[in-house]
Amino acid sequence: MTDQNPTAATASPINGAAVNGAGTISSVIPGWFSEISPMWPGEAHSLKVEKILFQGKSDYQDVMVFQSATYGKVLVLDGVIQLTERDECAYQEMITHLPLCSIPNPKKVLVIGGGDGGVLREVARHSSVEHIDICEIDKMVVDVSKQHFPDVAVGYEDPRVTLHVGDGVAFLKAAQEGSYDAVIVDSSDPIGPAEELFKKPFFESVAKALRPGGVMCTQAESIWLHMDIIEGIVENCRHVFKGSVNYAWTTVPTYPSGVIGFMLCSTEGPEVDFKNPINPIDVQENQIKSTIPLKFYNQEIHAAAFCLPSFAKKVIESKAEK
Amino acid sequence: MTDQNPTAATASPINGAAVNGAGTISSVIPGWFSEISPMWPGEAHSLKVEKILFQGKSDYQDVMVFQSATYGKVLVLDGVIQLTERDECAYQEMITHLPLCSIPNPKKVLVIGGGDGGVLREVARHSSVEHIDICEIDKMVVDVSKQHFPDVAVGYEDPRVTLHVGDGVAFLKAAQEGSYDAVIVDSSDPIGPAEELFKKPFFESVAKALRPGGVMCTQAESIWLHMDIIEGIVENCRHVFKGSVNYAWTTVPTYPSGVIGFMLCSTEGPEVDFKNPINPIDVQENQIKSTIPLKFYNQEIHAAAFCLPSFAKKVIESKAEK
């Protein structure tokens, strides 16, 4: 797929063909949504479409929602699946509780991206949390999620949440030094609006905004597809975070290769042992009454998420040691 | 997909449309192989096809090999991907070493199915093993694998291997009681030739062929797609195996939902604690000189494989307790 424009995914939800920026035609299964991208050349996952519920173009990206035949409603940004109702629990629960269950009494949490509200829903399960900032660049994602994904966007109902619509990079630069216990970066892929969120200056801003011994968790791609990107992230984080630097992963069927990874880092200060969670989540604590119970996360799967296949362990540990 | 014939998967490797037994037309991305089946309705994974290397019809199933654009060569049986060169390591290493690293000094091992030879390649890494029987029903799978997947079928080169072409159910019924340390069931899905391998009488034959404290590992579907099938397997195994009954899972990108599970059971006798492997595999032990090193398996990922997401844990543990 090297003849394609590397800055745009190509996908079409309906019968016929889609044309990306570079004019390459990509055909799809009629009546199905096919996720085709130069980020995962030579493969595509397809979902059968029952009905398209929303299609729009924001200042930043194409936004689409469709009702699938077997995965519930699906949110798509720039042709890439962000969440389905059937498997969103795995991603949202893991990206949130891996960091928050690793530190005692998190009080102030920042979410970068995550406009669908799912990470907010998960943060809100922690009764120690007093304030949750979220900085999402694309208001259309927030509005569309509130309209079409009430069980996800329910996170916005928590009174501790403050929404800032704007650039996460700028928000973090302006943030008070040492003010957050945890920063969760729920970004899309490094091609598109989220590009800067994978670079060293961004990680430096995150580290500065965190208290000593504060934690960051960021979406960090697939060990099967993007070891090159992961290597770069690990290297950047190793330079920036003087506490601990770890990689974890989990299963999400509708993400390319069926897995997604997370980079978990802590700043210099009280030691954080991500692999042995010390702040178990009590399901009774739940602050939002309308929230569904935890479906995926538990303490065992938390610890297991840090166990890597040998091919990934070798690369990640060699970078982490440098 | 309820209008489709539930006994046949539908897939087409090339331009155009495929028609299954019931006459339903299923279109695919031109030039791509799409895996469409009533076993996972409403979704399909597609791989770009460079060249079809083999297409045949054996007495049991359709057999196809193609060169994919990004996953190496791919083996397809009845329209369902069995292995790709890029990710076969995860499945073959886990289905083999989860059982064999859990018991001391395995000497006699039986493989049911597994005609591609990949499980043999992995069993052969264990120097304690003296004899390996394999019973594969479809000789075409063996021949095609030897021709097109030399790095997988290399397992047949080990002098300890005896190939029996025939029905695994009958082979086990005739097997000497208490004669095997381990039985590995590397089957396809329960729709098609492998149907009997998921039923109670088969598990009873396995248990009978195992020594006291012997172990079985069998392919056991996806927690995301087939909790109903898994419930049945767990229930059957709980009745049959009086030692321990466990479920484990791993990531395989080209399997539906990106994960595959394993049922790990032991017979009454010396206790087997599958979650704490006691027989580490030494890469230096390798008996076949031409075999590639381990890519996926290690002791940490062994233990982690038994940690289940809450939604699966709840169902499996409730069945296991009955």
Image (tube, coloured by chain):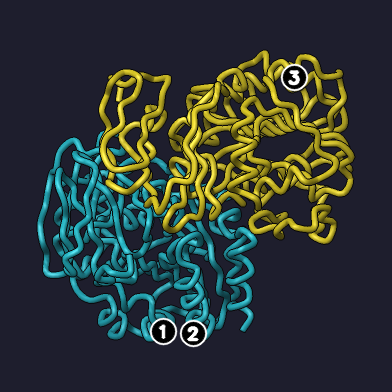
Chain colours: A cyan, B yellow
Please rate how many residues cluster around mark 3, counting C-alpha atoms within 10 Å: few if below 14, some from 14 to 19, many from 20.
some
**Residue that badge 3 annotates:** B171
**Horizontal side, residue A80 vs residue A123: left or right:** left
Q: Amino acid at mark 3?
A: Phe
Give the chain letter at badge 2. A
Disc 1 element: helix
Say if A296 sits above or below B113 in the image: below
Report the mark closest to the observer, 1 or 2: 1
Circle 1 sits on which residue?
A: A200
**Distance of mark 1 from mark 3, alpha carbons?**
60 Å
Residue type highlighted by circle 2: Val
* C-alpha distance separating marks 3 and 2: 60 Å
The image position of residue B3, as x and y in percent, is 28, 19
Mark 1 in CB contact with mark 2 (< 8 angstroms): yes
- Residue A240's disc number: 2
Depicted B225 relative to depicted A81: above or below: above
The answer to whether one can see residue B101 in this image is: no
**On the image, which quarter does residue A186 sit in?**
bottom left
Secondary structure of the residue carrying numbered label 3 = helix
Point 42% across, 50% down: residue: B51
Same-subunit check for callouts 3 and 2: no
C-alpha gap between disc 1 and disc 2: 8 Å
Asked if the residue at tag 3 contacts the one at tag 1, i.e. Cβ–Cβ closer than 8 Å, the answer is: no
Q: Which mark is residue B246?
A: none
- Which three-letter amino acid code belongs to the residue tagged 1? Lys
Q: Are marks 1 and 3 on the same chain?
A: no
Q: Are marks 3 and 2 in contact (CB under 8 Å)?
A: no
Q: Residue B275 location, x and y as percent?
A: 72, 44
Residue B204, placed above or below residue B248: above
Q: Residue at x 62, y 22 (%)?
A: B197
